[in-house]
């Protein structure tokens, strides 16, 4: 997908930007801009392409930034009407250079840049371009975002949460929010019952970010939110606590009703097939049988010890399921594990292991071997992926 996006932001898109700007700014020299913006563009990665085109826009638009950004805003196309821009495919990335323009050239022009961010986020997203303003103008930015939390546009309301995430993927961290997330949490209070799932999902992801540095603060926030909670807010809380549940955080598990240590016997744990090539997939299966005299509410996850490039195996916890077991009751567990190659994870050959993590407690599982993809050398890595001999 990243390669497709990178290719998308090429000459055709640059020409489309030039045409849109030329229609609202007759003095714009489209040919010169296209030649400038495409020079060396193909050698750059996606985000660097956005910055490269933005730099060309800065050279060819009026010298005065506020006049230049006004031209860009007037050149924008229609707003995204649906509440899920994922359905737009790659088309919104047309505006990646525009948000780069605001981010890299507009931080000293607060009002003009925030008007641009408000317009851009309704067509693409301004979550990247708003972050420098959180550092440079924190009080002004948070005050404005408090107003935007009530904006009629779902995209603007989502920006309030998404743009202030401390650890937003593919963007710089906001150090002040990593250290003290309370200004962002105050905005989430305004959005926790937003009518759109698109916004509530961002709120959950924001809380999940905060949980990585302030787990107890997030648990306490979620405990308060669960008082009189609607089904939609309860779902938000569960999603927000997912990382803490995977890590076995006792407070998070207890809040979701899984606080008691699991009393189980695991039988029939196996991975099929036991040997798989990179690009394939395996299925883990096991049966859980309660050894408790009382009913148990269980959160069942898998810890897969993937072999890394250095030959060491490190666990990645994969979300499983929740279940209720009566005394002596049993339940079958099944989970597919993909060894496909992704831009964010490349499988490596070697000995892998799977463990069950139930209510934060580890139970032994099974092993499997990953082989090189066909046509590659058959060398494998031994990997260090221990199977627990007794529950942790």
Image (tube, helix red, strand yellow):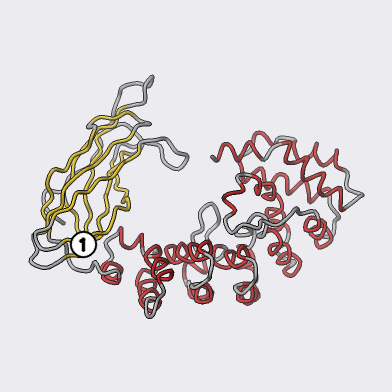
- Can you say which quadrant of the picture contains the C terminus? bottom left
Please tell me whether mark 1 sits on a helix, a strand or a loop: strand
Q: Is residue 318 left or right of residue 291?
A: right
- Nearer-the-camera pick, 264 or 231: 231
Rendered image quadrant of residue 369: top left
- Residue at the outermost top position: 375
- Can you say which quadrant of the picture contains the N terminus? top right
32 shown above or below 113:
above
231 shown above or below 169:
below
Residue 328, horizontal then vertical, whole percent: 8, 59
- Nearer-the-camera pick, 280 or 31: 280
Q: How many marks?
A: 1
- Nearer-the-camera pick, 329 or 244: 329
State the residue at coordinates (85%, 38%): 31
State the residue at coordinates (36%, 60%): 242
Residue 30, horizontal then vertical, whole percent: 85, 42
Q: Residues within 10 Å of mark 1 (few under 14, many from 20)?
A: some
The residue singled out by tag 1 in the image is: 324
Residue 25, horizontal then vertical, whole percent: 88, 52
241 shown above or below 373:
below
Rendered image quadrant of residue 360: bottom left
Q: Is residue 354 left or right of residue 197?
A: left
State the residue at coordinates (28%, 42%): 313
Rendered image quadrant of residue 314: top left
Residue 288, horizontal then vertical, whole percent: 15, 52
């Amino acid at each position: 997908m990243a390669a497709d996006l990178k290719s998308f932001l090429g000459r055709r898109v640059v020409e489309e930007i030039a045409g849109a700007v030329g229609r609202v700014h007759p003095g714009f020299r489209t040919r010169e801009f296209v030649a400038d913006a495409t020079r060396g563009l193909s050698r750059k990665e996606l985000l660097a392409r956005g910055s490269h085109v933005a730099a060309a826009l800065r050279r060819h638009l009026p010298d005065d930034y506020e006049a230049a950004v006004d031209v860009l805003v007037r050149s924008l196309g229609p707003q995204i009407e649906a509440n899920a821009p994922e359905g737009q495919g790659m088309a919104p990335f047309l505006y990646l250079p525009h948000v780069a323009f605001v981010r890299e050239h507009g931080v000293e022009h607060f009002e003009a840049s925030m008007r641009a961010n408000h317009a851009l986020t309704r067509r693409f997203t301004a979550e990247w371009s708003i972050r420098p303003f959180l550092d440079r103008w924190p009080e002004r930015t948070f005050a404005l975002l408090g107003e935007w939390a009530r904006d009629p546009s779902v995209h603007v309301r989502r920006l309030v949460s998404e743009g202030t995430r401390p650890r937003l993927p593919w963007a710089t961290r906001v150090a002040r929010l990593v250290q003290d997330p309370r200004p962002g949490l105050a905005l989430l209070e305004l959005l926790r019952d937003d009518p759109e799932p698109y916004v509530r999902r961002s709120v959950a992801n924001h809380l999940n970010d905060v949980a990585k540095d302030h787990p107890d603060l997030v648990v306490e926030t979620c405990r308060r939110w669960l008082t009189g909670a609607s089904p939609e807010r309860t779902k938000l809380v569960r999603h927000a606590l997912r990382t803490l549940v995977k890590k076995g955080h006792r407070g998070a598990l207890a809040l979701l009703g899984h606080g008691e240590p699991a009393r189980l016997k695991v039988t029939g744990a196996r991975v099929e097939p036991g040997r798989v090539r990179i690009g394939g997939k395996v299925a883990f299966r096991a049966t859980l049988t309660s050894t408790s005299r009382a009913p148990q509410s269980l959160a069942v996850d898998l810890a897969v010890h993937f072999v890394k490039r250095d030959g060491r195996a490190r666990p990645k916890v994969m979300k499983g399921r929740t279940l209720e077991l009566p005394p002596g009751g049993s339940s079958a567990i099944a989970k597919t594990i993909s060894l496909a190659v992704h831009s964010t994870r490349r499988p490596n050959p070697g000995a892998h292991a799977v463990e069950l993590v139930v209510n934060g407690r580890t139970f032994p599982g099974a092993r499997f071997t990953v082989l090189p993809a066909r046509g590659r050398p058959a060398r494998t890595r031994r990997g260090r992926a221990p199977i627990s001999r007794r529950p942790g």
